[in-house]
Image: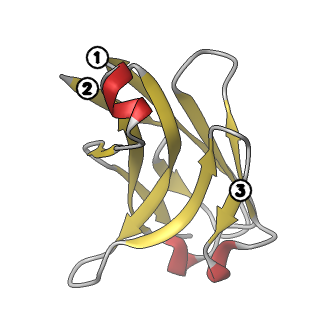
Amino acid sequence: QVQLVESGGGLVQPGGSLKLSCVGSGSIYSMKAMGWYRQGPGNERDLVAFITGGGLETYGDSVKGRFSISKGDAKNTVYLQMNSLKPEDTDVYYCKAQVYFSESDYDRRTASDVWGQGTLVTVSS
């Protein structure tokens, strides 16, 4: 059983900043990658930012230059620093991890997707 716990969401004014955290726990042999998606009512879940175990970062077009993803010093931890927030950034933000549950999964390069429960970010004056 693997769990991802997100924190850091809340209400912020336009132009402000927030930092989201995601911590993975449970039966994790190794983490292939971790990152963030967001989803609004009636919308698809869109990529915000992702980072691989080797440190390769990928960002959604709408957040490039404003958001920054990083790995924490603690194992299986990822952060999302969000600056210059806009009302259109209002969404539920979900942490996603690509996890190797066992050594055999790692040897076969078979990673499984695990999602957190989501944290709401509201950008409004």
Q: Residue at left 55%, top 27%?
A: 77
Task: Using the image, tell me which numbered label, if any, was put on residue 27.
Answer: 1
Which of pointers 2 and 1 lies earlier in the amino acid sequence? 2
Marks 3/2 in contact by CB < 8 Å: the verdict is no
Q: Which residue is mark 2?
A: 2
On the rendered structure, is 38 left or right of 2? right
In whole angstroms, how far apart are the C-alphas of marks 3 and 2?
A: 23 Å
Task: Using the image, tell me which numbered label, if any, was put on residue 40.
Answer: none
Marks 2/1 in contact by CB < 8 Å: the verdict is yes
Residue 7 in percent (x, y) is at 44, 34
Q: Amino acid at mark 2?
A: Val
Q: Residues within 10 Å of mark 1 (few under 14, many from 20)?
A: few
Q: Quadrant of the N terminus?
A: top left
Residue placed furthest toward the right: 65
Along the viewing direction, whichever of 44 and 41 lies nearer the viewer: 44
Secondary structure of the residue carrying numbered label 2: strand
Secondary structure of the residue carrying numbered label 1: loop
Q: Amino acid at mark 3?
A: Glu
Q: In the image, is residue 16 above or below residue 5?
A: below
Q: Amino acid at mark 1?
A: Ser
Residue 29 in percent (x, y) is at 40, 19
Q: In the image, is residue 96 above or below residue 87?
A: above
On the rendered structure, is 27 left or right of 93? left
Q: Residue at left 53%, top 72%?
A: 89
Which of pointers 3 and 1 lies earlier in the amino acid sequence? 1
Q: In the image, is residue 86 above or below residue 112?
A: below
Secondary structure of the residue carrying numbered label 3: strand
Q: Quadrant of residue 122?
A: bottom left
Q: Which residue is mark 3?
A: 57
On the rendered structure, is 111 left or right of 2? right
Which of pointers 3 and 2 lies earlier in the amino acid sequence? 2
Q: In the image, is residue 121 above or below residue 66?
A: above
